[in-house]
Amino acid sequence: YDWTHLQKSRPVGCTSLDDLNFPEYSEFNPDGLNENYASALGMYSEHCGLQTLLLLWSGPEYMYHMISAKKSTIPEEGFAILRYFTFNGWHSGRCFHELCNIDDELIRHSVEEFDMFRRKARNLCTKNISYEECDYLWT
């Protein structure tokens, strides 16, 4: 997790968004110091697809790699949701489009929809709600 950014997930090896929590620490981002990474594409080729990106090492990214290495039967849509739901700059902010391919554009809605549901569930369940209300949320 990159504490200088608002996003929990972002690609490394290219410029990041300007949504820094602490812009005074941006000089410590090694990607910004390397001229090969100091562009929107950075080390990637245009429309290479999100599956080729190196993302910040986060819990969901770790789970994605562990589960995919085990040859799980989770469908591609499930893997995309697992890996990209914290990648808000892409699915909600509509950023990083120069890195996306057709498959990424097709899956974006599902990832965004899952993230909206997840946020709603988290918000409801962090309040004092009854068992019935929580059960209703999941049915």
Image (cartoon, helix red, strand yellow):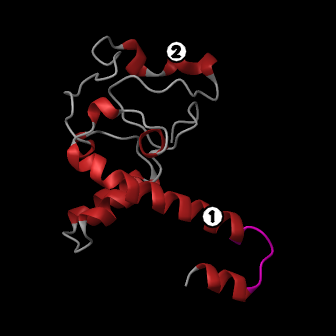
| Magenta-colored stretch includes residue 120 | no
Comparing 69 with 89, the one in front is 89
Q: What amino acid is labelled 2 in the image?
A: Glu
What is the x, y in percent for residue 72? 23, 72
- Vertical arrangement, residue 52 with respect to residue 119, above or below: above
- Structural distance between the alpha carbons of marks 2 and 1: 35 Å
Q: Amino acid at mark 1?
A: Lys
What residue appears at the point 31 percent right and 19 percent down from the top-left corner?
Answer: 37
Above or below 51: residue 11: above
- Residue at 27 percent across and 43 percent down: it is 50
Magenta-drawn segment: 125-130
Q: Mark 1 or mark 2, which is nearer the start of the sequence?
A: 2
Q: Residue at x 63, y 86 (%)?
A: 135
**Disc number at residue 120?**
1
Q: Which residue is mark 2?
A: 27
Mark 2 element type: helix
Return the x and y of residue 101 as percentages of the image width and height.
Answer: 22, 41
Can the viewer see residue 35?
Answer: yes
Q: Is residue 44 left or right of residue 27?
A: left
Q: Nearer the viewer, residue 63 or 107?
A: 107
Whole-percent x, y for residue 92 in the image? 48, 44
Q: Secondary structure at mark 1?
A: helix
Q: Residue furthest bottom?
A: 132
